Image: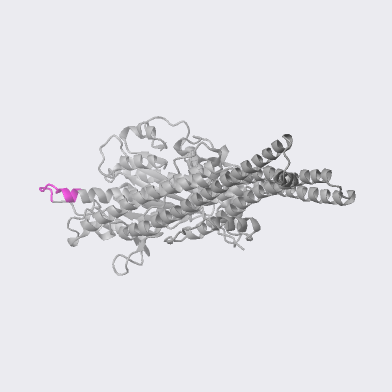
């Protein structure tokens, strides 16, 4: 019996990036723009939240946590920044001021929204404050105290050299890597980026334009607040495509607040855009409104639980496969919450429906051979009746019994097929496996400071991809709800842990890389190696029996031909007479054995055993390559950190994250592609 799962909370993560040096004349204007954007975002969140009012909203919103009438679950607006001078600090100050304003009245926009500040720093807070361009340290400390979470990465934020001294190469590399890893981590913690800059001005490493381009490449929409002197009449524009970066000065086709509403709706409440990227239905919301019956059924089953008994079909398939299993997968995942709870449910449902589907076609093709055997038995029995006299009443009862059994077999095949297809056993099996494997990746990306998972690069044009878009929505909703410090190492108390910032997490790249190598990749390699061996053994076993049965049919038909020739030529001998006596049995075998061969070939076709074996063998090679790259990176990192780390450039989280995302992308692509190739209904046997 599966207990109900809590639905994820409605959370929107907003990143902030922008100019550090701002003229005093721009600060007030920027504060006002941030307040307007936050008001629009909060208003939209409250309109989409299922626990606040009964206003019309997309169907998918009913699968966010709603709470009850006495204690509704409020949506959360989480704002993430690097807390640098200028734009970052103004954004935090604006949100705090907006929150105070929203709490003055229950009818004010934002009154029913929770707000959360998160600081992502390239190194520990003290080193960053003292060695970066932070000038107003008291403001930095004050805003840092308001943060619910603080993420400290492994960058080496060393101080600038004196003005009269040229920076050495290692110092420049350390600072560049530190700010690049900070910008990369910030983008992995947001669904929407608010950026403020003058794009006509120059930018440094990890600067705003570079961050905006990286955001668009990741599929993150950008709300751009232009600081260019000529854009005061067009202060806000929305950037969703690379070409939009060059058109920020053009007049928008619609008011910016309406466009932001549409963007937020597509992020939070339109599953069909999950794989379509920035070109998905620009400016349209109609597709977000309704879920079809299959999508609603899948989500209801995932959250509601219910009884999943071990039925006959899964046991039959398990027994059949067990005879071919010589290798077993070893190892275990480094599971972390909240992903483990959802992944365990998805994995359980995937195994359940996989057993049902594969057991169903095994039953179908076995019963098909039985049905043919019964039909041939009827003909053979009639032949025997013509040769030997038998009581009519007795022969009638025999024929009726055979006919009833054959009818029962055919009805069983029909009902088995109809039940499996109408309940979408195979579709649910591949969809839940897709969700389970995608959630598994978060076990290993989160400790590297990433709460973002890119969509697969394949299967975008298949009907399966559209169906699985609701699974992608569920995946992203679970990821968005996860706390920013998920999977990361808590800071040691007495160092940077303070009462003002109770949740301080630091990156531990070596531990994360070890988990990727020893848990994720090793487990996947063992799984695919065992799967390849099992499926190849199954294919070879079926192939051998098909060859044997075909040979037996040839021999039987050859004997039958010889017997006929002997009778035609008038040959009389004991063996000819004996052959004539057993002719009905030969006819029976000659008709039934091809049916058995067809059933075996159908099982081989439906199970895709050879294709699975080949794909898993290729995956083993690819994953071994990733594991070797992981070891190379660990060796480089350990070498740089040797001898007190005097030559350590820091910022290893960026390289580790890139490697982790390569692994996640490869596994996601394989699962998504297989979901398309293996998405087929039960066939009428």
For image coordinates 54% across by 58% down, the residue present is: 322
Near-viewer residue (304 or 346): 346
Magenta stretch bounds: 162-172
Q: Position of residue 112 (x, y in %)?
A: 52, 54
- Looking at the picture, how far across and down is residue 496, in whole percent? 30, 65
The quadrant of the image that shows the C terminus is top right
**Does any portion of residue 58 appear in the rendered image?**
no
Taking the image as shown, residue 660 lies to the left or right of residue 416, namely: left
Q: Is residue 359 above or below residue 497?
A: above
Left or right? Give the position of 578 relative to 535: right
Residue 68: quadrant of the picture: bottom right
Above or below, comparing residue 485 to residue 245 in the picture: below
Outermost residue to the left: 164
Q: Main secondary structure of the magenta part?
A: loop
Name the colouring of the figure.
one colour
Is 291 on the left-hand or right-hand side of 194? right
Q: Which residue is drawn at 38% across and 55% down?
A: 118
- Any part of residue 362 in sight: yes
Which residue appears at 57% of the width and 48% of the height?
545
Q: Position of residue 35 (x, y in %)?
A: 42, 47
Report x, y in % for residue 592. Answer: 68, 45
In this view of the protein, which residue sits in the foreground, 275 or 325? 325
Towards the viewer: 500 or 434:
434
């Amino acid at each position: 019996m599966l207990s109900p799962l809590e639905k994820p909370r409605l959370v929107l993560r907003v990143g902030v990036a922008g100019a550090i040096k701002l003229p005093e004349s721009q600060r007030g204007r920027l504060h006002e723009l941030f307040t307007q954007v936050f008001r629009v975002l909060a208003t939209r969140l409250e309109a989409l939240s299922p626990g606040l009012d009964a206003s019309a909203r997309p169907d998918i919103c009913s699968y966010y946590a709603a709470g009850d009438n006495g204690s509704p679950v409020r949506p959360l607006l989480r704002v993430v920044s690097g807390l640098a001078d200028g734009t970052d600090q103004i954004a935090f100050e604006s949100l705090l001021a907006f929150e105070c304003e929203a709490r003055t009245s229950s009818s004010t926009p934002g009154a029913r929204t929770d707000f959360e500040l998160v600081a992502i720093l390239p190194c520990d807070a003290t080193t960053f404050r003292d060695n970066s361009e932070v000038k107003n340290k008291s403001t930095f400390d004050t805003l840092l105290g308001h943060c619910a979470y603080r993420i400290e990465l492994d960058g080496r934020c060393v101080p600038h050299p004196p003005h009269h001294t040229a920076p050495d190469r290692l110092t420049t590399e350390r600072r560049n890597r530190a700010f690049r890893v900070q910008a990369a981590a910030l983008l992995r913690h947001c669904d929407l980026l608010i950026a403020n800059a003058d794009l006509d001005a120059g930018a440094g490493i990890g600067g705003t334009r570079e961050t905006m381009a990286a955001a668009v490449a990741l599929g993150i929409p950008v709300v751009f607040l232009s600081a260019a002197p000529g854009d005061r009449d067009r202060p806000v524009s929305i950037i969703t495509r690379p070409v939009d970066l060059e058109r920020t000065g053009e007049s928008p086709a619609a008011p910016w607040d309406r466009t932001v509403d549409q963007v937020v709706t597509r992020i939070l409440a339109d599953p069909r855009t999950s794989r379509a990227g920035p070109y998905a239905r620009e400016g349209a919301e109609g597709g977000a409104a309704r879920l079809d019956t299959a999508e609603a059924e899948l989500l209801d089953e995932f959250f509601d639980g219910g009884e999943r008994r071990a039925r006959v079909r899964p046991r039959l398939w398990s027994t059949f496969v067990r005879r071919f299993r010589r290798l077993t997968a070893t190892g275990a995942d480094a599971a972390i919450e909240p992903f483990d709870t959802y992944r365990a449910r998805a994995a359980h449902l995937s195994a359940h429906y996989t057993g049902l589907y594969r057991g169903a076609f095994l039953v179908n093709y076995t019963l098909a051979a039985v049905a043919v055997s019964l039909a041939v038995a009827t003909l053979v029995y009639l032949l025997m009746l013509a040769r030997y006299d038998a009581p009519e009443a007795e022969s009638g009862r025999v024929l009726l019994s055979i006919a009833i059994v054959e009818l029962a077999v055919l009805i069983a095949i029909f009902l088995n097929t109809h039940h499996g297809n109408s309940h979408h056993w195979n579709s649910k099996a591949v969809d839940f496996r897709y969700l389970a494997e995608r959630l598994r990746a978060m076990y290993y990306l989160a400790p590297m400071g990433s709460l973002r998972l890119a969509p697969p690069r394949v299967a975008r044009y298949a009907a399966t991809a559209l169906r699985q878009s609701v699974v992608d929505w569920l995946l992203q909703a679970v990821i968005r709800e996860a706390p920013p410090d998920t999977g990361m190492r808590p800071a040691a108390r007495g160092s940077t842990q303070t009462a003002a910032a109770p949740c301080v997490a630091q990156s531990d790249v070596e531990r994360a890389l070890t988990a990727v190598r020893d848990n994720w990749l090793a487990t996947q390699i063992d799984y695919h190696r065992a799967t390849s061996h099992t499926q190849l053994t199954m294919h070879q076993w079926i192939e051998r029996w098909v060859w044997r049965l075909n040979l037996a049919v040839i021999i039987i038909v050859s004997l039958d031909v010889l017997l006929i020739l002997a009778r035609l030529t008038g040959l009389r001998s004991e063996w000819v007479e004996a052959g004539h006596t057993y002719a009905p049995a030969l006819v029976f075998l000659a008709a039934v054995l091809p049916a058995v061969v067809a059933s075996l070939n159908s099982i081989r076709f439906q199970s895709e055993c050879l294709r699975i074996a080949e794909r898993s063998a290729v995956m083993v090679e690819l994953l071994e390559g990733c594991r070797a790259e992981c070891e190379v990176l660990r060796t480089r990192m350990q070498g740089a950190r040797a001898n007190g780390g005097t030559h350590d450039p820091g910022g290893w989280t960026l390289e580790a994250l890139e490697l982790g995302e390569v692994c996640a992308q490869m596994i996601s692509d394989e699962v998504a592609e297989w979901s398309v190739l293996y998405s087929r209904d039960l066939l009428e046997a």
